[in-house]
Image: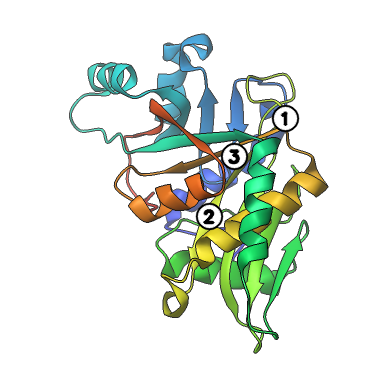
Amino acid sequence: MAEYVGPDSVVAVQKALRARTADLATQPLLSNGGRMLNILEADAYGWDRVRAEVQTYGYVGLTKVSRDTTLARLAQDFGPNADFPHWDVFTGQAEPVTTACRAIVGSYNLPRDWKLIHETMPDDQLIEAAQSVNLAAGVQSPPAYYLRSDFMPSMLTALIDGSGGMVACASGNMRYHADGPMAGGMFAGGVSVAEVHRRKGLGALVNAALLVESQRVLGWTHVLEQARATNLASVAMIEHCGLMSWPGVVTCMVNIGTGFQTR
């Protein structure tokens, strides 16, 4: 198991965010996304400060922003050599999301020796398996401490086959400040399915199972998930789980460095 995952530049950001835990606890408009710093309400945080954070880390995420307005501002501020990948935003309240997700979980007839497991403090073996499934699916895995709930409540959900192998996984965490605009919300993502088991609807199953169990255990009031508009399978999966899209609203990465890539 690797405590941190990715190229050296990406690992350096993960370590820096971990070291900044005490400061982030005092910043309602910031959150440790594990893989990158997330800024909420960039206008309120201040664009000078946004630029400073980008210079510090090489890349940051701007959560739930206007796509067109933000991309125009970023092009002006950072120029043609910067990269601004973005993901469509989907959100939902605890109800009706958990109702939709219970129906999904109940509709699957898994092999008798398969099982869904949910861990808020997964062991090294489970974390390593999730990292491997994420990597094979092109998903940047969070650092291990993040999955272990070292600094914030989180949950790792996995579908395990009869031989003990991980078929699929998803994770969620309560990364948002209690006094911030996303208070009470959970971020869910990292949905990954082993290649041999793809196109069977198991991504929807593991995502739905995560949302149901994490709401019961962690008590989130609303949830946010993200997907590229071109990733039609992920978009359909998220909407199937009861989340609604925000037309024209995205989470955007400001990337002036190299190294970070995810689906």
Residue shown at the point (42%, 52%) measured from the top left = 234
Question: Marks 1/2: CA distance?
Answer: 20 Å
Residue 17: numbered disc: 3
Based on the displayed image, in which of its 4 quarters is residue 61 positioned? top left
Query: What percent of the width, then of the height, locates residue 105?
Result: 65, 61
Q: Amino acid at mark 2?
A: Gly
Mark 3 lies on a secondary structure that is: helix
- Label 2 close to label 3 by CB (< 8 Å): no
- Does any portion of residue 181 appear in the rendered image? yes
Question: Quadrant where the N terminus lies?
Answer: bottom right
First reached walking from the N terminus: tag 1 or tag 3: 3
First reached walking from the N terminus: tag 1 or tag 2: 1
Mark 2 lies on a secondary structure that is: strand
As rendered, which of 18 and 162 lies closer to the eye? 162
Question: Marks 1/3: CA distance?
Answer: 21 Å
Question: Marks 2/3: CA distance?
Answer: 19 Å
Assess disc 2: are there few (<14), some (14-19) or many (≥20) residues with their C-alpha within 10 Å of its C-alpha. many
Q: Amino acid at mark 3?
A: Leu
Residue shown at the point (57%, 53%) measured from the top left = 142
Mark 1 lies on a secondary structure that is: loop
- In the rendered structure, the answer to whether residue 112 lies left or right of residue 10 reads right
